[in-house]
Image (cartoon, grey):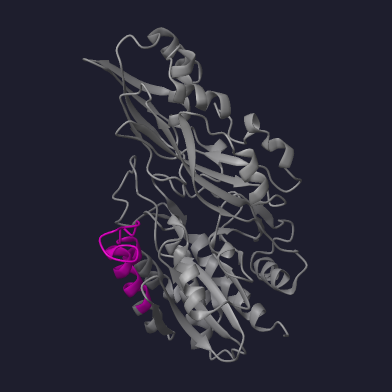
Amino acid sequence: MEVKRFILENFEDMKADLKKLVSFNSVYGEDEKPFGSTNRRVLECALKMMEEKGLEPNNVDYYAGFGQTGKGDKIIGILAHLDVVPAGEGWDSDPFTMVEKDGYVYGRGVSDDKGAAVASMYALKYLIDEGYDFKKRVRLILGCNEETGSECIRHYVEKCGQIDYGFTPDGNFPGIYAEKGMFSAKVVSRDSKIIDIKGGEASNVVCKKVNAKLPLNSFDEEKFKAYLDEHKIGYKMEKTDVIGITVFGVAAHASMPDLGVNAISHLLEALYAAGFEDHFVDWFHKHFALSVHGELLGFEKIADKVSNTSINFGVIYKKENDVCMSLDMRFPVMSDTKTVAGLMKIDDEHTHLEVGGMVEPLYFDVNTPMIKALKKAYEDVTGDHESQMEAIGGGTYAKAISNCIAFGCEFSGEDNHIHDANEKLDLESFKKQVAIYIEAIKNLNEIED
């Protein structure tokens, strides 16, 4: 059957499957191991879907699961994830009830990454239905904690081994040949004069709203307002026995913090400008202020022709006498964790970093057979021979398994509001994904070992 006809005949089923997966609020949970009861249930649902499409289902201890077809010693892996970041505020509809409007579907996970999981399922269904001769085994591997550390794929590798060729449809077309390294930490500052503070949804999302309580007469309120007005930042203030403040920003993915407006950064900088005498506010101003590329710490020295550094503060809260804040950094592909750790020695007597993890960058030569096979699939389907593969700041499953790059699912020029309210997916792009993944699997299958 012609690919286009197959997609049209199966399109309502594709949307129904995606709607079913979106209905699971599959954020990380602690009510049941390993990643919460909802992630267990969404995995069971996805495994059943894959079995219905002719794939042999396998549950890897609820960390991940995969559907398999084909034969041979070599394994082609397609890696997508079923977990999502918290929905947050600002949606025009229920984020876990997928709605269709004006050629788009809306819901948490439609683009990141449940839509790509469904597109990959139907790409494999097409090849199975057509009786395609698989020279290699193909596994659609679905993980359950990509957004909170990718332990799912590390567990998969430990139990099931590496893959020989593969892609994760969790980036951009025509592909990602390099990913920045990652450095995560919790900032802990003792004895701040901030009475209470709370903001953010996740460490890998630019904070869009923060609430704080501060002592009366502790800063110049007119200077505070003037700073926020100058920077066109929304805010609210009220006085009781304390000063209550809410500052509003704009969410974005942590890998591209300059596309958002960080409410945490602007609150702290407004307090600094208003003369709030506090060692945590001073520490933040000295080392970060409004910079998102590590300029105040000397990170411009390690920037390369491919990438620079990006820094995001996603979550902040007060715990007993400590202000705690997440720090999410993506650093250049030609650098390394040792260099970054050296630049991040910024502790003082009040404030220190609790390093959560460091991951080395990922880099592939664009002339390798695997990369060329994937790019050809994109070009043959779209007719676009001008777009080039790129380096990104986001971290994907490609860092957690060998022989894998991010390949789709977002097309150039699209803004699907990933990690933000009203996440969406263009239905024509959804169709196109299936066609590209069909060709990608065929091209990887034909690589001579």
Residue at image location 46% in from the left, 19% down from the top: 270
In the image shown, does 374 or 324 lie closer to the viewer? 324
80, above or below 68, in the image = above
Residue at image location 72% in from the left, 51% down from the top: 334
Magenta residues, start to end: 19-47
407, above or below 297, in the image = below
- Drawn side of residue 117 relative to residue 78, left or right: left
| Rendering coords of residue 385 (x, y %) | 74, 61
- Drawn side of residue 135 relative to residue 123, left or right: right
Residue lying at the far left in this picture: please name it: 240
Query: Residue 399 lies in what quarter of the image?
Result: bottom right
The reply to whether the magenta stretch includes residue 185 is: no
In the image shown, does 361 or 261 lie closer to the viewer? 361
- Drawn side of residue 107 relative to residue 257, left or right: left
Residue 155 visible? The answer is yes
| Rendering coords of residue 226 (x, y %) | 45, 11
The reply to whether the magenta stretch includes residue 23 is: yes
| Rendering coords of residue 412 (x, y %) | 61, 52
Residue 253 visible? The answer is no
Marker count (numbered):
0
Q: Quadrant of the C terminus?
A: bottom right
In the image shown, does 64 or 20 lie closer to the viewer? 64
61, above or below 37, in the image = below
| Rendering coords of residue 343 (x, y %) | 64, 39
Residue at image location 45% in from the left, 64% down from the top: 151
Residue lying at the far front in this picture: please name it: 349
